[in-house]
Amino acid sequence: MDSNKNNIGIKLEYEVKKDDFTRAGEASSNIKKVLRQLGIDSDVIRRTAIATYEAEINIVIHSEGGTITVYIKPDRIEMIAEDSGPGIEDVRLAMQEGFSTASNKIRELGFGAGMGLPNMKKYTDEFYIDSQKGGSTTVKMTIYI
Amino acid sequence: MIVKDLVEKFNFKLLTERDGLEKSVDGVYCCDLLSWVMSHAKNNDAWITVQTHVNVVAVASLLNLSCVIIPESIEVDEDTIAKAKKEGIPILSTDLNAYGIFSKFYEAGMR
Ligand SMILES: Nc1ncnc2c1ncn2[C@@H]1O[C@H](COP(=O)(O)OP(=O)(O)OP(=O)(O)O)[C@@H](O)[C@H]1O
Ligand SMILES: [Mg+2]
C-alpha cells in the first residue's frame, strides 16, 4: 500500500494479481479500513467497498493483473481499476446483468453471476469503462461524499 | 438477537473464536453467488452459504454481515477459518439445511 497525504487528498494504490484467490478482496478491505479511520459516512464506505471489491475480483478472474488506485478527496472518492489485458470484446454486452464469461470452475466458487460491472455502475455516482479486445481495461468510478 | 444466541440457543457450532459474538443479527440472507450477495445482503445480516473459500470472509467483512452460517455440516477450508478469525467474522456450522436454519430464526421471533 502506498499512501501519501497532500492537499488534494489521500492516494491509495494496490497491485492486484491474476488468479490470486486467497488474497482477492484484500485491496478493497484495506480501502474500507482507511475510509473508516477517516470517519467517512457508512453508506459511502459500503458503496465504495462494493465497487472496489467487484473491480478487484474482475482483475483477479478476468485479467492478466493490474492495479486499483483510490483518491480520497474532501468531496468525493475516485477509484481507478486498470489492468494489462486481455480486454473486453463487447463492453455493452459485458455491462448486462447476467452476462459472464467465467469458467465453470470459477462459477462453482460463486463468481460469474454477471453482476460485478452492473453493481459497480449501480453503487457509484459516476462510472466509466474503457476496454478493447487485445488491450487493457480501465474502469473509473466516483462516489460523492 | 446476537450471534452468541445462534451458538447458545440454536446449538450452531462456532468454528471461529469469541470475536464478533456480540454482533447484532438483524436479518438472514441466503445466496451463493458472491456479487449477488454483494448487492443484496444488508448490514448485520447472518449469511447462509455453501461457499467455504476465503473470499466469503472478504464479502462478509466488506458488507458488515454479522456472521456466516454454513449449512448441512459442509467442511470449511482451514484458510477460511484462519482469515475469519483474523477479521473477527464468526463462522457457524450446523447440520440443518437452509430451510431448517430459516425455521430456527422464525421460531425465535425473527419475522
Ligand atoms: N478486467 C476485465 N478484463 C477482461 N474482461 C473483463 C474484465 N472485467 C469484466 N470482464 C468481462 O465482462 C464480463 C462481465 O463482468 P461482471 O463483473 O459483470 O461479471 P462476472 O465477473 O463474470 O461475474 P460476477 O462479477 O457476478 O462474479 C466478465 O465475465 C468478463 O467477460
Ligand atoms: Mg465480476
Image: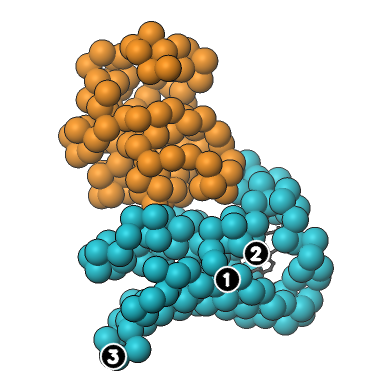
Chain colours: A cyan, B orange
Q: Nearer the viewer, mark 1 or mark 2?
A: 1
The answer to whether one can see residue A45 in this image is yes
The x, y position of residue B1, in whole percent, is 27, 23
Q: Secondary structure at mark 1?
A: strand
Q: Is mark 2 within 8 Å of ligand 1?
A: yes
Which badge, 2 or 3, is on the more N-terminal residue? 3
Mark 1 and mark 3 on one chain: yes
**Residue A36 in the figure: left or right of residue A45:** left
In the image, residue A16 above or below residue B107: below
A129 relative to B97, above or below: below
Residue linked to disc 2: A62
Whether residue A67 sits left or right of residue A94 in the image: it is: left
Q: What amino acid is at disc 1?
A: Glu
What distance separates the C-alpha of mark 1 from that of mark 2?
23 Å
The quarter of the displayed image where residue A55 is located: bottom right
Give the camera-side residue of A44 and A112. Answer: A44
Nearest to viewer (mark 2 / mark 3): 3
Which quarter of the figure has residue A27? bottom left
**Chain identifier of the residue bearing label 3 in the image:** A
Percent position of residue A37, x then y: 23, 65
Looking at the picture, do discs 1 and 2 lie on one chain? yes
Q: Label 1, on which residue?
A: A126
| Front position in the image: A105 or B85 | B85
User: Which one is closest to the eye, mark 1 or mark 3?
Assistant: 1
Residue occupying image coordinates x 64% and y 74%: A128
Q: Mark 3 highlights which residue?
A: A6
Pinpoint residue B73: horizontal percent, then vertical percent.
Answer: 43, 21
Please report the residue visible at 72 percent of the width from the left and 82 percent of the height from the top. A135
Between the residue at mark 2 and the residue at mark 3, the CA separation in whole angstroms equals 34 Å
Amino acid found under the numbered disc labelled 3: Asn
Q: Helix or strand or loop: what does disc 2 sit on?
A: helix
